[in-house]
Amino acid sequence: MFAYNRSFLSGYDFLVHTVNCNLFWQCPTRHVVDLYRRHAGARHLDIGPGTGALLRRARLSPGTAVHLMDLNEGPLEVARRALPRHRVETHRQDVLKPWDLDEASMDSIAMSLVFHALPGDSIGAKSTAVQEASRVLAPGGRFFGATILPLGRSVRTTARARWLMDSYIRRGVFDNAGDDADELDSVLRDSFGTVRSRTRGCVALWEAWN
Ligand SMILES: C[S@@+](CC[C@H](N)C(=O)[O-])C[C@H]1O[C@@H](n2cnc3c(N)ncnc32)[C@H](O)[C@@H]1O
C-alpha cells in the first residue's frame, strides 16, 4: 500500500486539489467540499482524512464532534492538528475490516478520494466500507464522498487523465482499474434506501441515507 507519510502529505493538497482534480480528473474540489457543507452532522466521521483540508474548507460548525479513521498514523495526526477548534477523536483502522465503532453512533460519514486507493479488483470487493457506514450511521445519517474511476457509462476520461491514472496504478498509488461508477451506485443501493450519485469528469460523487 502507498505510504501516506508526513513528507508526502506536505505537498498533497497542492498536487491533488490544485493540480490533479482540476487538470486531470476534471472535477474541482469545491464539488466535494459542497457535500460536506450540505451533509456533515453533529457527529461526523471522516474516513481517510489526508491533511484534513476538506474538513477545514467545509467550515464545520464549532460543536461538531469529529472522528477521523485512517490506516496510517500520519494523516490522523496531520488532520487532527488542522482542526484545533474541534473535539477530535482518532481511530487507527482499516476501512475494509469491521469497524470498531458502535451502531448508530454517527450522524454523517465522508469517504473522499479513498475508494480508488483501496485494494480490490472492483468496487464490490471494497463494499465492506459501505456496509459498515450503513451500520454505524444513526437513522437519517448521511454517507457521502467521491472517488476517481476509469469505468462506467457516465465517466468522462480524457487521454491525459488515463495517462496519470495508469501511472498511479503501476506505482501502487491507485488500485482502481476495475472500479466502475455503475457498480458503485449498485453497491450503495444495497445498503441505503436513498442514493444520489453523479459523475464529473472521472470522479463519482455520491450522497446516501436511510
Ligand atoms: C488520497 S487520500 C484522501 C485524503 C482526503 N480525504 C482528500 O480527499 O484530500 C487517501 C486517504 O485514505 C487513507 N487510507 C488508504 N487506505 C486506507 C484503508 N485501507 N483504511 C483506512 N484509510 C485508508 C490514506 O492514509 C489517506 O489518508
Image: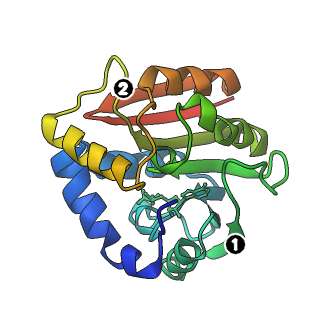
Q: Position of residue 209 (x, y in %)?
A: 63, 32
Identity of the residue drawn at 66% across and 26% down:
192
On the rendered structure, is 165 left or right of 149? left
- Beta carbon at label 2 within 8 Å of ligand 1: no
Q: Which mark is residue 74?
A: none
The 10 Å Cα crowd at callout 2, few under 14, some 14 to 19, many 20 or more, is: some
Please state which amino acid type lies under the numbered disc 1: Glu
Identity of the residue drawn at 57% across and 80% down:
77
Q: Nearer the viewer, residue 75 or 31?
A: 75
Please state which amino acid type lies under the numbered disc 2: Leu
Which one is earlier in the sequence, the residue at label 2 or at label 1? 1
* Closer to the eye: label 2 or 1: 2
Residue occupied by mark 1? 89
Considering every residue shown, the one lying at the far right of the view is 102
On the rendered structure, is 120 left or right of 99? left
User: Quarter-wise, where is residue 63 in the image?
Assistant: bottom right
